[in-house]
């Protein structure tokens, strides 16, 4: 037994000495090993990752076109299912600090006690492709998933994230919430201070969301002055605390151009949890949208939970 433990520790030291990231998932896609290289590249420690499901999509893997790999193109899952090694040169992951990074990925399958485990090795693409090429690839990928005005995820990425969360809810019962918000006073800002200042207000709210949503959540610009936060929450109480906090952060922040003109920058927001009655991923977004407009008609600078006759402030 001691010899086996010594071997395990020796293998772990070898894997930790590799500059590339290495992680292992079991048949149920739970992460069972996360190397020192994976910690360095992603910013996530082994303590944060081991025991999590890789289809939590904390790393938000996408291909060059912005397609989320967890939506059906996961090379590690394909490797486990088919037993064939996979190699992809251009994949993007999201580091813990929010930065998107171009990496290359190689996967293989190992069988232990009759069960299949997937092993993924990933490294920074710049080390093999060069800085200039990676910068161009990054630029192309960023334009596919990012909103050019705010830097948040765009509508295309949001739609894919909603579809993935809904599929996981149907398959695993993993609940999530949708919060939609828009700026109450954007028309007044545009009319009084000009559209350039209005764009600044949109960027200002986007910055508050980027800095304050949880690392596993998705903040996206839906369009115009509307934003959506997709969050892994399971109760109305948690959703209400989260939604009210975001509304308060905007209220308590100071957008100087508006304040100097005697205008307040606030948002109205509505939220809902996915429900068993939902027919597709759009139903929760529709309820959040309706709750947002109810909050706006209720006096603005408000968060409401929607989706049932008993919705409450």
Image: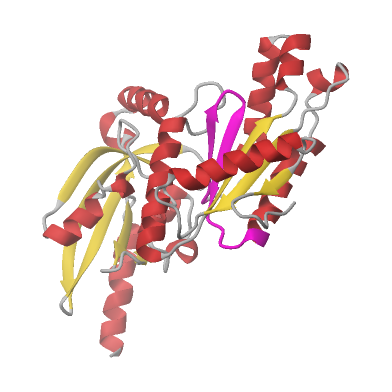
| Magenta-drawn stretch contains 75 | no
Residue 173 location, x and y as percent?
Answer: 42, 65
Residue 113 location, x and y as percent?
Answer: 18, 80
The number of discs equals 0
Residue 177 location, x and y as percent?
Answer: 55, 52
Q: Is residue 76 left or right of residue 94?
A: left
For residue 146, above or below residue 58: above
Hey, which residue is sitting farthest bottom in the picture? 1
For residue 62, above or below residue 215: above
Q: Is residue 35 visible to the viewer in this orientation of the structure?
A: no
Picture quadrant where residue 182 is located:
top right
Residue 234 location, x and y as percent?
Answer: 56, 62
Rendered residue at 21%/41% (across/down): 88
Rendered residue at 53%/48% (across/down): 217
Rendered residue at 72%/35% (across/down): 296
Picture quadrant where residue 185 is located:
top right
| Magenta-drawn stretch contains 222 | yes
For residue 177, above or below residue 34: above
Q: Is residue 51 left or right of residue 24?
A: right
Q: Which residues are magenta?
A: 216-237
Hey, which residue is sitting farthest front in the picture? 309
């Amino acid at each position: 037994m001691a010899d086996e433990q010594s071997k395990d520790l020796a293998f772990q030291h070898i894997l930790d000495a590799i500059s590339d990231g290495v992680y292992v998932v079991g048949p149920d896609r739970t992460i069972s090993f996360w190397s020192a290289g994976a910690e360095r590249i992603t910013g996530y420690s082994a303590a944060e990752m081991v025991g999590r499901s890789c289809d939590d999509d904390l790393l938000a893997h996408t291909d060059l076109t912005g397609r989320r790999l967890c939506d059906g193109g996961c090379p590690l899952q394909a490797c486990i299912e088919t037993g064939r090694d996979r190699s992809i040169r251009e994949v993007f992951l999201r580091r813990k600090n929010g930065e998107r990074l171009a990496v290359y990925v190689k996967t293989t399958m190992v069988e232990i006690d009759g069960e299949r485990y997937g092993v993924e090795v990933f490294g920074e693409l710049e080390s093999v492709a060069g800085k200039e090429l990676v910068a161009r690839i990054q630029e192309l990928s960023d334009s596919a998933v990012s909103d050019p005005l705010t830097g948040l995820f765009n509508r295309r990425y949001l739609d894919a994230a909603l579809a993935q969360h809904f599929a996981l809810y149907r398959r695993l019962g993993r609940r999530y919430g949708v919060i939609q918000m828009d700026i109450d006073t954007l028309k007044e800002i545009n009319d009084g201070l000009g559209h350039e200042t209005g764009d600044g207000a949109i960027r200002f709210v986007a910055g508050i969301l980027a800095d304050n949503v949880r690392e596993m959540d998705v903040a996206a610009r839906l369009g115009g002055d509307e934003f959506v936060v997709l969050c892994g929450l399971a109760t109305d109480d948690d959703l209400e605390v989260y939604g009210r906090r975001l509304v308060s952060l905007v209220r308590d922040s100071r957008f100087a151009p508006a304040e100097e003109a005697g205008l307040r920058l606030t948002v109205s927001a509505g939220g809902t949890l996915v429900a068993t009655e939902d027919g597709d991923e759009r139903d929760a977004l529709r309820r959040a949208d309706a709750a947002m407009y109810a909050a706006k008609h209720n006096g603005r600078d408000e968060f409401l939970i929607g989706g049932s006759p008993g919705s409450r402030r």
